[in-house]
Image: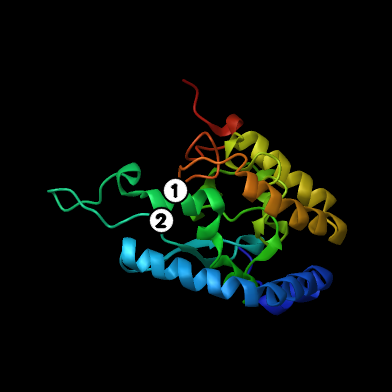
């Protein structure tokens, strides 16, 4: 795992970083009221904490803390254990996921330089040991709030197709492509295309590993 700081990312992707800052700072006057109202609704309906914070692999697999709004309650069963996700996901949580409101805190990851507006979505840390050598290439660019996979199926695609889309972006990345994806994303969100309410960004659920690495049945 390579230790690469945010200034290094800015030097390697100066145009991309400039677009991230210009777009994010320009959107902040419109985003902050929405973020504030969403946070208030979560506090009333779900209680605290307001944020779901989880370590994710970023550029060159360097871990960072990714921020999202919490979409589930802390409801527990008689044994004191958290109830299954589907029992804790509220109607408002489903609305946040389908409209991507839960992703709004990710803009602070962008301002910190840990993420970009466009790139492969950051997945879970333990998936790193399950990637094929080809799939590891998705970390050759900063992770994104949206990406080529998100505007081409969102989370209804299977893992193999998702990784192919991520790798296509890595191989064809450009500022023009980033701008195209940024412009496509609001339309996809408004249409709620490719939406599921699972906590995994794929219709297959948890990533078990590259097909060639999976044990035979």
Quarter of the figure with the N terminus: bottom right
Tag 1 near tag 2, CB within 8 Å: yes
Categorize mark 1 by other alpha carbons within 10 Å: few (<14), some (14-19), many (20+).
some
Tell me the number on the disc at residue 132. Answer: none
Q: Residue at x 64, y 44 (%)?
A: 191
Image coordinates of residue 148 in percent, x first then y, are 73, 48
Distance of label 1 from label 2 (alpha carbons): 7 Å
The residue closer to the viewer here, 98 or 69, is 98
Q: Residue at x 81, y 59 (%)?
A: 179
* SS at badge 1: helix
Q: Residue at x 46, y 42 (%)?
A: 198
Categorize mark 2 by other alpha carbons within 10 Å: few (<14), some (14-19), many (20+).
many
Image coordinates of residue 117 in percent, x first then y, are 69, 63
Q: Residue at x 66, y 44 (%)?
A: 135
Compared to residue 81, the image places residue 112 above or below, namely: below
Quadrant of the image occupied by residue 118: bottom right
Image coordinates of residue 113 in percent, x first then y, are 65, 74
Quadrant of the image occupied by residue 210: top right
Residue indicated by mark 2: 71
Residue indicated by mark 1: 94
Image coordinates of residue 151 in percent, x first then y, are 70, 46
Q: Is residue 76 left or right of residue 201?
A: left
Question: Residue 139, can we see it?
Answer: yes
Q: Is residue 133 left or right of residue 96?
A: right
Q: Is residue 166 left or right of residue 210?
A: right
The residue closer to the viewer here, 128 or 32, is 32
The residue closer to the viewer here, 103 or 58, is 103
Compared to residue 49, the image places residue 133 above or below, namely: above
Nearest to viewer (mark 1 / mark 2): 1
The residue closer to the viewer here, 136 or 200, is 200
* SS at badge 2: loop
Q: Earlier in the sequence, mark 1 or mark 2?
A: 2
């Amino acid at each position: 795992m390579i230790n690469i700081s945010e200034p290094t990312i800015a030097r390697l992707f100066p145009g991309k970083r400039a677009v991230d800052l210009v777009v994010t700072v320009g959107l902040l006057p419109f985003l902050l009221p929405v973020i504030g109202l969403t946070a208030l609704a979560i506090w009333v309906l779900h209680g605290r904490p307001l944020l779901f914070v989880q370590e994710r692999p970023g550029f060159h697999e360097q871990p960072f803390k990714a921020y999202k709004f919490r979409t589930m309650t802390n409801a527990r069963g008689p044994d004191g254990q958290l109830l299954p996700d589907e029992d804790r996901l509220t109607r408002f949580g489903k609305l946040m996921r389908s409209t991507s409101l839960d992703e709004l805190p990710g803009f602070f990851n962008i301002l910190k330089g840990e993420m970009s507006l466009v790139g492969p979505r950051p997945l879970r840390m333990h998936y790193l040991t399950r990637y094929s050598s080809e799939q590891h290439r998705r970390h050759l660019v900063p992770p994104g709030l949206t990406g080529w996979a998100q505007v081409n199926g969102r989370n209804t695609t299977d893992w193999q197709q998702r990784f192919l889309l991520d790798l296509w972006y890595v191989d064809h990345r450009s500022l023009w492509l980033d701008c195209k994806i940024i412009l496509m994303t609001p339309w996809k969100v408004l249409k709620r295309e490719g939406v599921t309410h699972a906590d995994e960004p794929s219709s297959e659920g948890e990533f078990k590993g590259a097909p060639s690495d999976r044990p035979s049945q």
